[in-house]
Amino acid sequence: MTAPASLVDRHVGFVHALREAGLPVSPAEGLDAAHALMVIDLTERETLREAYAATLVKRPAHRPGFDLLFDLWFPPVAGRTENDPAVEDAALPELRERLAELLTGDPADPAFREFARAMVGRFGQVQAAPGRQSWFSFPVLRALSPETLVARMLNAMLDERGGLPEKVARQHIARTIEAFTEAVASDVRRRIAEESGIEKIARSAARPPIDRVDFLRATKEELARLRREVYPLARRLATRLSIRQKRGRRGRLDFRRTVRASLSTGGVPLTTHLRPPRPHRPELVVLCDASDSVSTFSHFTLLLTFALREQFTKVRAFAFVDTVDEITGLFAPGADVLDAIGRLTEEADIVRFGRTDYGHVFERFAERFPDAVGPRTSLLILGDARSNYQVPALGTLKRLAGQARHAHWLNPEPRAQWDTGDSLATSYGSVVPMHECRNVAQLAAFVETLA
């Protein structure tokens, strides 16, 4: 596919690509961005980037995906360095010397990205399949090995090694190496997009914002970022829940006070008096599938549950695989929650044969913890409803849900996969309302309704 022929086509394609990558861009915001283009200098690429960012990006977490797609749809014009014979003919030691000079400087220097593009042109094209070549970052970074230049750069930057100056220098070098790595990757994506089409590379290269990353498909790096999202998310949700509770505080009519006040107006109750509302904070019981297939989802949800514990009178947590055990004690005040999750599978009695059995879990839970669920309890079940073709024990689940004030089930699988294979999603969903909960955005929306 060829690149869009006009600025309008490129604008429409860029906005569509942002939406496909999970960034919430409304039609009105797309029009705002188009209006912004009319009042800026379109030849200034960074001004164009910031105009789009100001009108289309809502959260800092959305910025990396935005920048990646912007670089694809509005690539920089290749500079003279890419075709500079002095660079093309230079030996590898000379190129590494030039890279060391750039890495000790400012990554915003145009020469920095021009050098990265030149190196992709020289080292980045390799044979991907018989008769077909493509572009890759790895051969560029392998040839130049920027990490092995650190000692040389430190000697150039410092008169004396050690102490705070060296620490600051190392931090600067780490940032510039990361910037060079990203510049190489960006130019590789640009070249592939020129050959294969922008839309194709955009779909494969752009990761969704962290709040829309699928729990069950998160990478190791994304898992670390998800954990960092827990406490900011908990604070936002706690604030919203508190505001909602305050706005809804209206006690029952105080008849005696209202009648007494009406005596001053001839018996007409112009002013009504209400009794102070009874404070109500529900109890929360969490039944959490701890099997490997949903471990990422259950761990993150437990982190959020215990970060929000002050919103509930009492929180009790139970983990299960094919039997169930209480794990509330692992999350005692002051405990490291990540450490508690790590201890969960070792210390909790949750495994008999290692295959998830929801029916046996519900029956054992009702038998071992008969007082856990009561009229003030919100019961929250976390799991994919896949029970390895075992008896579902729907009657027991119905009795548990009937004892609770509210009951909800969060399922991390896409709704399209419910009822496939050994999934009992519809059967269990007929007893306890089941919600798709695949990412942080869906989880946050659900938690706001919970209390």
Image: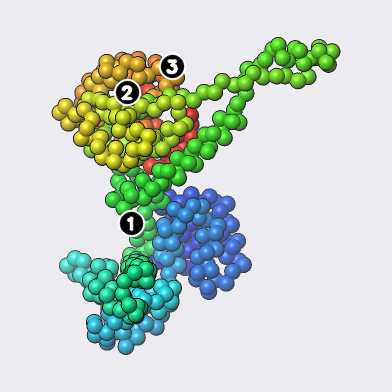
Q: Tag 2, which secondary structure?
A: helix
Name the quadrant containing residue 246: top right
Instruction: Answer with left or right where residue 366 lies relative to residue 35.
Output: left
Q: Is residue 331 above or below residue 267?
A: below
Residue topped by disc 2: 427
Q: Is residue 172 above or below residue 374?
A: below
Name the quadrant containing residue 251: top right
Q: Horizontal and vertical percent for residue 138?
A: 25, 67
Residue topped by disc 3: 375
Q: CA distance from mark 1 to mark 3?
A: 49 Å
The answer to whether one can see residue 393 in this image is: no
Residue in view at x 28 percent, y 78 percent: 152
Which of these two is toward me, 421 or 228? 228
Q: Quadrant of the N terminus?
A: bottom left
Which of these two is toward me, 293 or 18? 293
Q: Horizontal and vertical percent for residue 284?
A: 41, 26
Q: Earlier in the sequence, mark 2 or mark 1?
A: 1
Q: CA distance from mark 2 to mark 1?
A: 36 Å
The kind of residue on which mark 1 rests is Ser
The answer to whether one can see residue 365 in this image is: yes
Q: Is residue 235 above or below residue 267?
A: below
Residue topped by disc 1: 204
The kind of residue on which mark 2 rests is Ser
Q: Horizontal and vertical percent for residue 365?
A: 28, 20
Q: Tag 1, which secondary structure?
A: helix
The residue carrying pointer 1 sits among few (fewer than 14), some (14 to 19) or many (20 or more) residues within 10 Å by Cα, namely: few
